[in-house]
Image (spheres, rainbow, N blue to C red):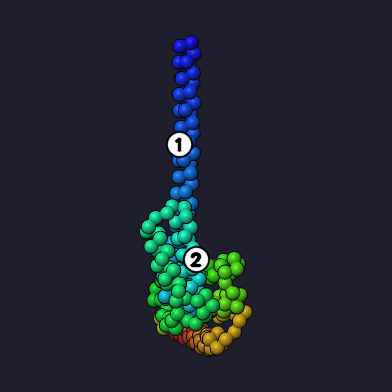
């Protein structure tokens, strides 16, 4: 009888140990999944907040700024649901206060100021930022969070800004090459700028003015190259004639 009780207690102890271990493993798995989900949401939030900071550098609509702030607040709410904290609640309150003064349908410009970057790294970073903004805007529109009319207007603004940066950069490089008497390189930059404009389906005052300016620059370069080639040909012919009529050396 005593042995039976002892064996039963041992079995019960083993079962309890197994159950406790299973519960601990389940909790550890849940905690791991929560941390992974929290990290995933935080990564998206970092990208959105980075875009929010970027908006100050571009002449884009306030609707884009409002959209990004709305998205950031939603991500913070999701993070707080996964792993609640007072710090997250404070940040949510900050966004809620900010959003009271914003309107998702306000397409007026945040700022009309815009300065073209001075070096290639800044230019590449700015173009990539515009691509990210367009991607975020497109994603939110696909989810039905952005009015179609607002989306079309803001996306066109971003697209035109992206085109302007690319074209102005190529023109600037072309001018620098021309001033350095590198006519071949200058022509390549201008031709690329012209193709960049022609690849876009829309036309406005900016594209028309730049199209005319680039064509005029290309015509000037073509004329100068033609004159240079003509001068080279005349010089070669003159050298050949001089060589032909030079006195023969006596051996």
Say which quarter of the image contains residue 51: bottom left
Q: Residue at x 61, y 75 (%)?
A: 148
Residue 213 sits above or below residue 20 on the image = below
Looking at the rendered structure, which numbered label has been put on residue 100?
none
For the residues bearing labels 2 and 1, Cβ distance under 8 angstroms:
no
Residue 66 sits above or below residue 39 on the image = below
Q: Residues within 10 Å of mark 2 (few under 14, many from 20)?
A: many
For this orientation, the residue located farthest to the front is 1
Q: Quadrant of the C terminus?
A: bottom left
Quick one: SS at disc 1?
helix
Quick one: SS at disc 2?
helix
Looking at the rendered structure, which numbered label has been put on residue 71?
2
Q: Residue at x 48, y 36 (%)?
A: 23
Is residue 155 at least partly visible in the picture?
yes
Q: Residue at x 57, y 72 (%)?
A: 146
Mark 2 or mark 1: whose residue is earlier in sequence: 1
Instruction: Between label 2 and label 1, give the one nearer the viewer.
Output: 1
**Residue matched to label 1:** 24
């Amino acid at each position: 009888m005593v042995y039976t009780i002892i064996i039963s207690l041992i079995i019960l102890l083993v079962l309890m140990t197994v159950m406790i271990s299973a519960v601990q493993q389940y909790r550890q798995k849940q905690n791991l999944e929560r941390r992974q989900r929290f990290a995933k949401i935080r990564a998206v939030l970092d990208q959105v907040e980075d875009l929010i900071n970027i908006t100050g550098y571009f002449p884009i609509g306030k609707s884009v700024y409002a959209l990004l702030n709305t998205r950031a607040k939603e991500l913070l709410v999701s993070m707080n649901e996964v792993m609640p904290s007072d710090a997250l609640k404070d940040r949510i309150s900050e966004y809620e206060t900010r959003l009271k003064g914003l309107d998702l349908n306000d397409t007026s410009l945040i700022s009309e100021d815009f300065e073209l970057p001075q070096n290639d790294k800044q230019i590449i970073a700015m173009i990539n930022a515009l691509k990210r903004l367009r991607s975020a805007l497109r994603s939110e529109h696909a989810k039905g969070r952005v009015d179609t009319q607002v989306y079309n207007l803001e996306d066109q603004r971003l697209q035109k800004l992206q085109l302007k940066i690319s074209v102005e950069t190529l023109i600037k490089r072309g001018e620098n090459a021309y001033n350095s008497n590198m006519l071949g390189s200058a022509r390549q930059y201008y031709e690329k700028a012209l193709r960049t404009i022609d690849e876009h389906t829309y036309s406005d005052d900016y594209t028309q003015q730049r199209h005319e300016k680039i064509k005029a620059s290309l015509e000037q370069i073509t004329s100068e190259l033609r004159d240079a080639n003509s001068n080279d040909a005349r010089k070669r012919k003159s050298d050949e004639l001089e060589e032909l009529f030079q006195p023969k050396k006596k051996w």
